[in-house]
Image (cartoon, rainbow, N blue to C red):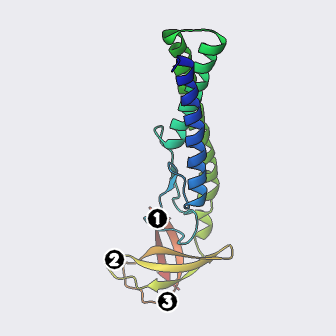
């Protein structure tokens, strides 16, 4: 196998991996392999994201970034060996920076995209202050319960605690006073 063929194999492997990653992330679930929504502390149950703290985490060593590196590493290597006639060392000097630069650009583009979309959804948390909700799981003195509320035509559930520390029974109407760390602080009406 020639050096150019090794780079070609890397190029094809990167493309195939990216296509499979895309297919399985869209056919197999809510989240792509390296982008996950942290909704464990509450927020909108049943929604694709949580408006109170839905941070998508993008890591530099993720399947999509690795696929971008592999594809561009292969492309740079193919160009340097087949078009420029470089040997192993000179082709690596071209291929490695191609892979790293494109993977870095891809990573920061995705990170920027998620930060912009998160910033637009984070602003909606302030709109929930003063909204009415109903307690669906009783709130006790020393633990968190759950509230149900409607927002933009959709019904959501979220963990909640009492603003005065007193228990609130199921079915009680409450007002959302603040949202902090995914926990809604509510008071009786």
Say how many tags the image has: 3
Viewer-nearest residue: 54 or 16: 16
The tag earlier along the polypeptide, 3 or 2, is 2
Residue at 58% across / 68% down in the picture? 47
Residue 17, image x, y percentages: 55, 42
The tag earlier along the polypeptide, 1 or 3, is 3
Q: Secondary structure at mark 3?
A: loop
Q: Secondary structure at mark 1?
A: loop
Q: Is residue 39 above or below residue 90?
A: below
> Any mark on residue 172, and which?
3
Q: Which residue is denoted by mark 1 in the rendering?
A: 182
| Label 3, label 2: how far apart the Cα atoms are | 17 Å
Residue at 63% across / 67% down in the picture? 127
Residue 174, image x, y percentages: 52, 83
Lateral position of residue 55 relative to residue 84, left or right? left
| Label 2, label 1: how far apart the Cα atoms are | 14 Å
Q: Which residue is denoted by mark 2 in the rendering?
A: 143
The tag earlier along the polypeptide, 2 or 1, is 2
- The reply to whether discs 2 and 1 touch (Cβ–Cβ < 8 Å) is no
Residue at 50% across / 50% down in the picture? 33
Question: Mark 1, residues whose alpha carbon is within 10 Å: few (<14), some, or many (≥20)?
Answer: many
């Amino acid at each position: 196998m020639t050096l150019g063929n090794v780079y070609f194999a890397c190029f094809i492997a990167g493309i195939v991996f990216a296509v499979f990653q895309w297919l399985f992330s869209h056919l197999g679930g809510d989240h792509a392999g390296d982008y996950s929504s942290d909704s464990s502390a509450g927020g909108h149950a049943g929604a694709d994201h949580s408006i109170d703290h839905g941070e998508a985490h993008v890591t530099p060593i993720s399947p999509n970034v690795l696929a971008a590196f592999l594809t561009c590493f292969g492309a740079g290597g193919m160009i340097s060996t087949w078009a420029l006639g470089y040997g192993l060392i000179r082709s690596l000097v071209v291929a490695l920076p191609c892979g790293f630069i494109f993977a870095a650009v891809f990573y920061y583009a995705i990170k920027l995209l998620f930060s912009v979309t998160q910033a637009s959804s984070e602003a909606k948390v302030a709109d929930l202050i003063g909204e009415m909700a109903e307690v669906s799981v009783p709130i006790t003195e020393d633990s968190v319960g759950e509230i149900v509320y409607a927002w933009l035509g959709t019904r959501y559930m979220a963990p909640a605690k009492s603003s005065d520390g007193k228990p609130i029974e199921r079915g009680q109407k409450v007002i959302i006073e603040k949202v902090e760390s995914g926990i809604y602080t509510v008071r009786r009406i």
